[in-house]
Image (spheres, rainbow, N blue to C red):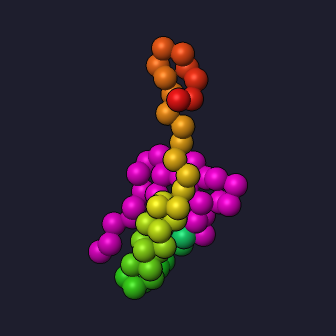
Amino acid sequence: MIPAPCKRNCCLNQADVCMGCGRTLSEITGWHQASAEQKQQILLRSAERMLQQPALPLFQASRGKPS
């Protein structure tokens, strides 16, 4: 059994890709019906997407502005 990569930080971007785990909306909703091979492919694609995501700006605690 391959566990879902969900980080419980679900937020879809404009391309319907979860910013928490990197899966597309269709990959998320189809996870339980996917075969082990399909899940491995989803994991590979989602990891690749996570590496391609732009980093979020860091905020300075004292000023509340991006650094």
Q: Is residue 35 visible?
A: yes
Q: Position of residue 4 (x, y in %)?
A: 39, 64
Is the N terminus in the top left, top right, bottom left or bottom right quadrant?
Answer: bottom left
Can the viewer see residue 29 in this picture? no
Task: Indicate the quadrant where residue 64 lies.
Answer: top right
Work out whether 8 lies above or below 37: above
10 w.r.t. 22: above or below: above
Identify the residue at image location x=60%, y=69%. 26
The answer to if 46 sits in the magenta stretch is: no
Residue at 43% from the left image edge and 66% from the top image edge? 47
Q: Residue at x 39, y 78 (%)?
A: 40
Give the residue at the far front of this rendering: 67
Tell me if 64 is positioned left or right of 21 in this view.
right
> Where's residue 43, x and y in %?
42, 71
Seen from the viewer's position, the closer of residues 55 and 35 is 55
User: Residue 10 at x, y = what percent?
Assistant: 52, 49
Q: Residue furthest left?
A: 1
- The residue depicted at 54 percent of the width and 56 percent of the height is 53
What residue span does the magenta drawing correspond to?
Answer: 1-26
Residue 48 % position (x, y): 47, 68
For the stretch drawn in magenta, the main secondary structure is loop
Looking at the image, which residue sits at the far top? 62
